[in-house]
Image (cartoon, grey):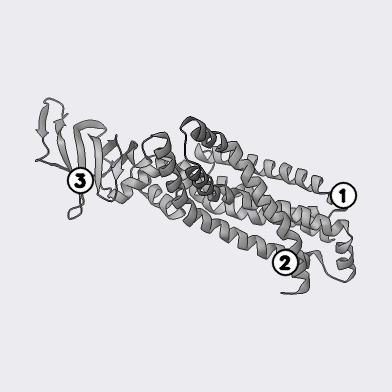
Amino acid sequence: MKLLDKHILTELLGPFLFGVAAFTSLMFAGQDLFKITEMLGKFHAPIGDIVKLVLLRMPMFVVYTLPMAMLLATLLGFGRLSGDSEVVALFAGGISLYRIAVPVAIVALSVTGISFVISEIVVPSTSMQFETIRAKLVNEPLKTDKSFAGVVEKDGITSTVFYVQRGIDAEKGTLKDVVVMQYRENKPAAFIYGSEARWNMEDNTWAFMNGYWKSLNTGHTMTMTFSNSETHIVKLDRTPKEMALLQKGADAQNNLSFAQLRSVLKMLNSSGQDINTYRVQLYQKISIPLATLVFALIGTPLGLRPHRSSSAMGLGLSIVIIFAYWVLMNYMSILGNSGVIHPAAASFIPTVAGIAAGVFLIVRAAK
């Protein structure tokens, strides 16, 4: 690494770390501070558990604040270099803006990779731990105890809708309070209820216990009950792991990894359900980390302007750019969720537009 690269990275490091801490704190204060304070006062939660909740929540926010911190770092770092005429000296020595931007781009791509790893590996785990501790403190059921539903499309003629009222134990392979409605040619054919359903790995079916099966065929109705010692076999084409993903996806799509979201999307797509929201979320698992590169490209030329050199101006400009970018991203998400535009376009239009704007600003500033 050359001396120039080390010097630039040193200038960026301080503002970047400050940006991560500041923006993460602001997001936490706006979203979770009141809830956690309520746990402390209303439910008398131990300080140790409160500290754990705060730490477990940080990775989810960091995924969003890393791009913001990169923008602030480039604006303040290059603003300082420009204000002290160091950039003028570099230009006078024959060093171009493109060369100056190289270490910034490398760092931005590295931070993009780190952000994706945090989103893919760390966030799903810490979010589940956060929910486990939170539910225990406020005496609420865990997400694994919460209801969820799904649809299984067989061949275009028959379909099955299931509703699990009291959650799933994926490790034991059991569902609690399960209702199943089977359809043939869009008409109800059978209704099944079981207080418990157990997974049979050998033939990929669910054994319903302590419930009843009711035929709804036109012309005659027949009801059959079964106890704990008896079972009624139902094929739902969903393993316990897939059921758990459906439940988790319905409750908190942002906390699923890229691979988990793909699995949920595949299951829902086969059942004919609306999957636009899931597809937008899937593509944003890539586009949001790439915002780091977007903000680095935009912040570098803007930070080199002499009148941007003050910290207050740099912070204010970063807030304006971040606000504009997230407004565009949220608007595109709404269009993608509603099916107005393709989910991939909805997710990547802000990224492509931001990269184009950054390249344009760098080219113009280099002239």
For disc 1, the marked residue is: 307
Q: Residue 83 location in percent, x, y? A: 87, 56
Residue beneath disc 3: 198
Position of 282 relative to 12 (above/below): above
How far apart marks 3 and 1 lie (CA) works out to 68 Å
Q: Nearer the viewer, residue 229 or 39?
A: 39
- Sort mark 1 into few (<14), some (14-19) or many (20+) by Cα contacts within 10 Å: few
Viewer-closest of 302 and 74: 74
Tell me the SS state at disc 2. Answer: helix
Q: Amino acid at mark 3?
A: Arg
Q: Is residue 21 visible?
A: yes
Residue 298 visible from this viewpoint: no
Of badges 1 and 2, the one in the foreground is 1
Q: Residues within 10 Å of mark 3 (few under 14, many from 20)?
A: some
Q: Amino acid at mark 1?
A: His
Structural distance between the alpha carbons of marks 1 and 2: 23 Å
- Between the C-alphas of marks 3 and 2, the distance is 57 Å
Q: Residue at x 89, y 63 (%)?
A: 88
Which label number is shown at residue 38? none
First in sequence: mark 3 vs mark 2: 2
Q: Position of residue 250 (x, y in %)?
A: 40, 40
* Image spot of residue 87 (x, y percent): 85, 62
User: Is residue 240 found left or right of 108 in the rendered image?
Assistant: left
Disc 1, SS: helix
Question: Which residue position is annotated with label 2?
Answer: 102
The amino acid type, in three-letter code, at marker 2 is Val
Please tell me which residue is depicted at 89% across the width and 61% down the height of the picture: 85
Q: Is residue 108 left or right of residue 184?
A: right
